[in-house]
Amino acid sequence: KIFPVASPSNYSTAPISEFLLICFPNFQSWQHWLSLPLSRLFLLAMGANTTLLITIWMEVTLHQPMYYLLSLLSLLDIVLCLTVIPKVLAIFWFDLRSISFSACFLQMFIMNSFLPMESCTFMVMAYDRYVAICHPLWYPSIITNQFVAKASVFIVSRNALLTAPIPILTAQLHYCGKNVIENCICANLSVSRLSCDNFTLNRIYQFVAGWTSLGSDFILIFLSYAFILRAVLRLKAEGATVKALSTRGSHFILILFFSTILLVVVLTNVARKRVPMDILILLSVLHHLIPPALNPIIYGVRTKEIKQGIQKLLQRGM
C-alpha cells in the first residue's frame, strides 16, 4: 500500500498524535526483498552480541578491563538494533507504519545519543590498546576496573546530556497536520521538516553537537592508532609485528568503516536534493545494523581468549 504525500493545501492546524513512517517512498516494492538480508543481519547482530556478553559474564578469566569495554560496546549495539530494526521489519512485513508521538522522540533520543556513545567507546578502547602496546609496564596501574567504571559514566553522561536537546527541540516544534515521515526511522531532520515552525536552531545544534562529540572522538582514535602503528613497526620480532598489525588493523578498519558510513549519512542529508531519498534511507538503516553485526566478530571472535571462552560455554551447554 502506497501512502501519497499530502500537499500543503491539505494541511490542517490540528495537533497530531502519531506519525506514519514511509520507507523508500519511490520504491516500496523493494521492502519484502530487503527484509531478508536485514532480518538475517539483525539475527546475526543480536546473536553475536548476546553470545559475547554471556561469554564474558560466565568466564572468570575474561573479567578484565578490556573485556568490560567490549561488553559495553555490545550493550550499546543491542540497544541500537532493538530501537531501530524491529520497527523497520514490522513496516516491511506487517505494514505497521504508525508510531506514536512519544515513541518517535524516544527513538530519536536513543539514536542520537547511543551512536556517539559507540564512538566514545571506540575512543576509550583505542586508548586501552595504546597503553597496552606503547606503555605495557604502566598498563595494570592505568587501565583498572575503576578506570573502566569512570570511563563508562563519562561515555553515558557526556553523550546523553549533549544530545538530549535534539529531541527536546524537535518535540517543541508545532506540527500542524502533515504526519508522513519519509523515512524508516524518526531521524531528527526528517521529523523536523514536518513542522510549521522554523527549525534552523534544531539543525544547527545537531550539526555542532554531532561534530563536537564525534569529531573529537575520531581525532583521538586516529592519534592513538598512529602511535600504536609507530610502536608496532619498531618491534624487532617480525612475527609479533605481523600479528599486531593484523589485530589492530582489523580494529582500525572497522572504526574507519563506522566513521565513513556516518560521514556519508551526514553529508548526503546536507545535500539531500542531489542524492535520491531512498539511498539516504538505506544508508541510515544500514548504519544502525552493519556495525553492530561486525563489532562482536572483529573485536570478539578474533580474540583468542574469547574464542576459548565461547568453546567452554558450548561445552557446558552440551
Image: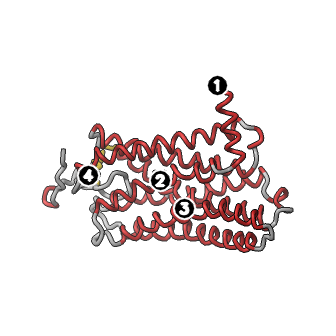
Q: Which mark is residue 318?
A: 1
Q: Quadrant of residue 244?
A: bottom right
Q: Are marks 2 and 3 in contact (CB under 8 Å)?
A: no
Say few, some or many: other residues with alpha carbon within 10 Å of mark 1 (under 14 / 14 to 19 / 20 or more).
Answer: few
Say few, some or many: other residues with alpha carbon within 10 Å of mark 2 (under 14 / 14 to 19 / 20 or more).
Answer: many
Q: Are marks 3 and 4 in contact (CB under 8 Å)?
A: no
Residue at the spot 71% in from the left edge and 69% down from the top edge: 228
- Residue that numbered label 2 is attached to: 290
Left or right, 71 with reference to 43:
right
Q: Quadrant of residue 123?
A: bottom right
Which is more N-terminal, label 3 or label 1?
3
- Residue that numbered label 3 is attached to: 162
User: In the image, residue 200 lies at what x, y percent?
Assistant: 37, 70
- Residue that numbered label 4 is attached to: 179
The residue type indicated by label 3 comes to Leu
The residue type indicated by label 1 comes to Met
Q: Residue furthest front?
A: 238
Which is more N-terminal, label 3 or label 2?
3
Which is more N-terminal, label 2 or label 1?
2
Q: Secondary structure at mark 4?
A: loop
The residue type indicated by label 2 comes to Ile
Say few, some or many: other residues with alpha carbon within 10 Å of mark 3 (under 14 / 14 to 19 / 20 or more).
Answer: some
User: In the image, residue 230 lies at what x, y percent?
Assistant: 72, 74
Q: Secondary structure at mark 3?
A: helix
Residue at the spot 72% in from the left edge and 54% down from the top edge: 150
